[in-house]
Image (spheres, helix red, strand yellow):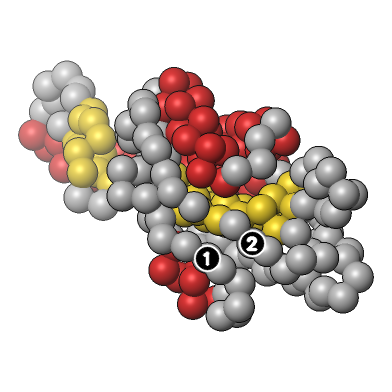
Amino acid sequence: MAVARARGDLLGALVVEHVPLNVLGRRLSILDGIAHQLSLAMENARLAREVALQQRLERDVEVARDIQASFLPEACPVVAGWEVCSYWQAARQVGGDFYDFIPLRPREDGGERWGLVVADVADKGVPAALFMALSRTLMRTVAINRIAPATTLARLNELIFADAKTDLFVTFFYAVWEPDTGRLPSTATGILNSIVSAVHAHVGVTEAFDDMTRVAVKRKAESEE
């Protein structure tokens, strides 16, 4: 009997009929050679499968990244008297962080309004990217029909909670920006402190509400602006 091994693992055994002792040694040498060749072939086949799988996964991740990037704004708002810039870089190839500029209906006096969004899904990789796509789409749908940031996030929470089938959740900063007045009424879920430190002191960002630190955790939530 001769055995085929790869990296110490037993792959199989070659068993032949009884042969006279005077030829057994030569037969075993031949069988050992065959077993060695078989083990090499099987190991190479396994490695080829692993490489092919890794290549497919890399292609899938690249497609997911392209899709995720397509959900981000192509350009920043161009507003007289203001310079608006943005930068986004996922911690991994695909993640759940995103931002958005949402054109809202103007005020009654014609003044512009923009919805500003910064959000972070509590995970990384493809699941977070998919949850990000859901959150971003629902956020735009809700924000276009509402102005008050607190009301917007409360409604968003209800919709995401109803649709989410996983344990993922997302934290939000949402503000309604009026460029001509400089007003920025806002609310947040979980990431307010980092936003406040980046906003100029004359822009009145207020405290987040206590009952809703994460979106898609509770069905009902209320906030203060």
Q: Nearer the viewer, residue 20 or 29?
A: 29
User: Is 73 displayed left or right of 126 in the figure?
Assistant: right
Residue at left offset 63%, top offset 32%:
142
Mark 1 belongs to which amino acid? Val
- Amino acid type of disc 2? Leu
Of all residues, the one furthest to the left in this rendering is 21
Q: Earlier in the sequence, mark 2 or mark 1?
A: 2
Looking at the image, can residue 38 be seen? no
The image quadrant where one finds the N terminus is: top left
Question: Which residue lies most toward the bottom here?
Answer: 201
Report the disc number at residue 184. Answer: 2
The image quadrant of residue 207 is bottom left
Graded by Cα atoms within 10 Å as few (under 14), some (14 to 19) or many (20 or more), the crowding at tag 1 reads many
Position of residue 8 measured from the top left corner of the image (x, y, whole percent)? 20, 50
Residue designated by label 1: 205
The residue depicted at 91 percent of the width and 70 percent of the height is: 80
Q: CA distance from mark 2 to mark 1?
A: 7 Å
Secondary structure beneath label 1: loop
Evaluate whether residue 19 shows in this view: yes
